[in-house]
Amino acid sequence: MPEPTGQPVGPFPAGVDPEDYDRLRRRVLWSMPSGLYVVGSRAGDRQNGMTCNWATQVATNPKLVGVSVERGALTHELVEAGGAFSLSVLAREDRALVRRFVKPVEADPDARTLNGFAYTTAVTGAPILEAAVAWVDCRLDRTLDAGSHTLFVGEVVAAGFQRPEDTPVLRMEDTRMSYGG
């Protein structure tokens, strides 16, 4: 896998300025709607919650969900070692919460909190935020090398709602955050 260089990444159409084209391409990719979630992970006694916007259902039979996690992230290490992850779907009104999960968290297993936010667990033991509107708990099914990231595909082994189903959920567009592209 190539190391990040800070330079625009091709390919580029003939005759374009790579830096201008790279900026355009990032803006186009940022325009794609995406949710904003917290991925829970655990391996043994270690736990983490991480803000994630690259998550989607990838199959219906079996029910599979994919999350793309940067290789250097603690969550990557824990999902790989623990073989599981959870995905907490957040309410739009909780947009400030995701900023608390952009770096490795302070986990307190005795109080069952991540950065002071209460969590619960389901089948796999991966933490699920109690503040979530809805959640899925996934057993790792397969991985796919995706350049700077790994696509972790998990089979949904448990799911539920913790708030009314019609609660508006958080999207990247609801924040001033941007990632990717």
Image (cartoon, rainbow, N blue to C red):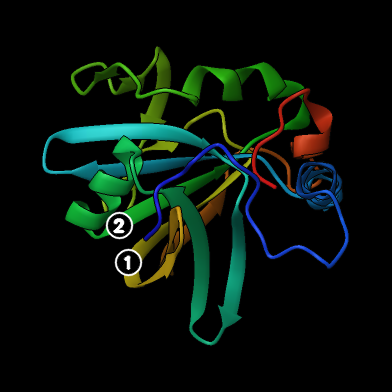
The N terminus - image quarter:
bottom left
Percent position of residue 130, x then y: 49, 30
Secondary structure at badge 2 equals strand
Q: Position of residue 2 (x, y in %)?
A: 40, 56
Q: Residue furthest top?
A: 116
Q: CA distance from mark 2 to mark 1?
A: 5 Å
Mark 2 residue type:
Ala
Of 58 and 20, nearer the camera is 20
Q: Quadrant of residue 26?
A: top right
Classify residue 29 as left or right of residue 1.
right
Q: Is residue 51 above or below residue 122?
A: above
Mark linked to residue 84: 2
Q: Nearer the viewer, residue 79 or 73?
A: 73
Q: Which mark is residue 170?
A: none
Q: Residue at x 73, y 41 (%)?
A: 164
Please report the residue visible at 39 percent of the width from the left and 61 percent of the height from the top: 138
- The answer to whether residue 42 shows anywhere in this view is yes
Instruction: Give the residue number, with chain letter if any, for mark 1.
Output: 140
Q: Is residue 121 something that shows in the picture?
A: no
Mark 2 and 1 residues: CB-CB less than 8 Å, in contact?
yes
As drawn, the residue found furthest toward the bottom would be 61
Q: Position of residue 99 (x, y in %)?
A: 58, 19
Residue 127 against residue 2 in the figure, above or below: above
The amino acid sitting under disc 1 is Leu
